[in-house]
Image (cartoon, rainbow, N blue to C red):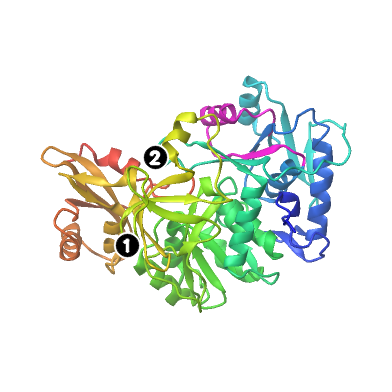
Amino acid sequence: MLQPTTLTRLLADPTSAEPAIIAADGTVAISYRALADQVERLASRLCGSGLRTGDPVALVLPNGLELLVLCLALPRAGLIAAPLNPSYNAGELRGFIADIGALAVVTEEGRGAVADCAAELAAPIWTSSIEPSGEVRIAGIGSGSRGAAAEPNADDVALFLHTSGTGGHPKVVPLTHANVLLSARHIAGHYGLTPADRSLVVLPLFHGHGLIGAALSTLASGGAVILPARFSASRFWRLFRQHGATWYSAVPTIHQILLQRADGDEAPRSGARFIRSCSAPLAPAVLGELERRFGAPVVEAYGLTEASHQVASNPRPPRPRRLGSVGFGTGVEIAIIDAGGRHLPTHNAGEVGIRGPTVMRGYLNSRAADAATFVDGWLRTGDLGVLDGDGYLTLSGRIKDMINRGGEKVSPAEVEAVLMGHPAVANAAVFAVPDQKYGEAVEAAVVLKADADPEALRSYARERLADFEAPKAIRIVSALPINVTGKVDRRALAARYALAD
């Protein structure tokens, strides 16, 4: 018998009285039954909005109950939910709303800049609010209704998510009901999530890591999603204990912040069932510190917006984890391919290619990008890696991030991992700067947690790296620039130091 493959079947038990979503301030908690009921009611109202099946709706909302409910209710009504970063300025918002062709925009009351952008693009504004009961209300969509929403198809597009934009302007990724549902189920199954688990969401829901990796996977398991409006390091562990969280997923920069503050914030030394890291490389030294300080196993994963987030992951103990690896494929096939698209044997380095039911069919309105991305049905990820004989994947960096120093290729991630092994280094980023002799030179910016001078750090790196990999200069900085998805912005560092001596 075929399994249902639309988001209408995401909730583990839509009749359960157990909590599904808990607002982090504790004032609102809704059960699975209440969530399922209001998704149906909202979908019915949306059916009377005048929009047609497959029309996109932009969501310019902070993390919270409204955003998560709408990411379920819009696809239930046959529409496409397109969550956008509410911190975008007016010009950015106008561009992204136009990119997706949004035919309506949902935002909070009082967001004049959003209303102005929508008006310029002739898209109606719908405003959202929450009743004390936890009921999400949407004003402006009219009172008409087509009645109960028809069941969507598995291949209908449910979400428009944007890539992180580390390689240029973010591209729009259409994800189908089947893509998203299967990814959430694979994540829940891979980590053995149960109704007893509670996930504290620290990442934005406008990106796949927060939305699918932390929130929807939890709802697929019957557990509870603890949902603050934003990440606050000072409140993190209080919320974790208060609401009985059992796990969280974050990018390495957030893990490092929590480590640096752990003693001052009286962070517990046990209690989490596991900690997940994804979206950027986690230095082995940081992984070890996380496990020692918080008393929980750390599993490193590999995600891609184009694959509905998770591509691969190490398993939870007692299954074997491999240090430095992002684990094996979860619901997708992984291959290593060369520049011509030919598959390479195990233990050979090349580009990571993937295919499977969670992988998108193509970008929105971008045939050129599709032609460059797909080869013989495999999606070229732009990441470099190696598969071992057991299918564990080790990544060595983004192809576009590789530094070409006189013909020698340097992986920033590998140099960063070495620098992060120094006891005085809290965080590090490696980037390229122009060089008259070699074309590009390797430089690094580091954040310190103890005294160290740049020359001592360079000596430490030279002892552990080939000559061409060692940074020519190391800059001591108070913080590294971070993009909206929590990744270190190497391009910003390269631009800052490109003209420095």
Cα separation, mark 2 vs mark 1, equals 27 Å
Mark 2 and mark 1 lie on one chain; the one further toward the N terminus is 2
Q: Quadrant of the C terminus?
A: top left
- Front in this rendered view, residue 139 or 377: 377
Q: Which residues are magenta?
A: 77-105
Image side of residue 300 versus residue 358, left or right = left
Instruction: Rate crowding at label 2 as few (under 14), some (14 to 19) or many (20 or more) other CA atoms within 10 Å.
Output: some
Across and down, in percent, residue 448 comes to: 30, 61
Q: Residue at x 80, y 53 (%)?
A: 36
Which residue sits at x=57%, y=76%?
271
Categorize mark 1 by other alpha carbons within 10 Å: few (<14), some (14-19), many (20+).
Answer: some
Tag 2 residue: 167
Q: Residue 20: x percent and y percent? A: 73, 61
Q: Residue flagged by tag 1: what amino acid is it?
A: His
Residue that label 1 marks? 347
Residue 284 vertical position relative to residue 111 in the rendered view, above or below:
below
* Left or right: 459 as drawn, with respect to 119: left
In the rendering, at what x and y percent does residue 481 appear?
A: 38, 47
Residue 501 placement, left or right of 241: left
Q: Identify the element where label 1 is drawn.
A: loop
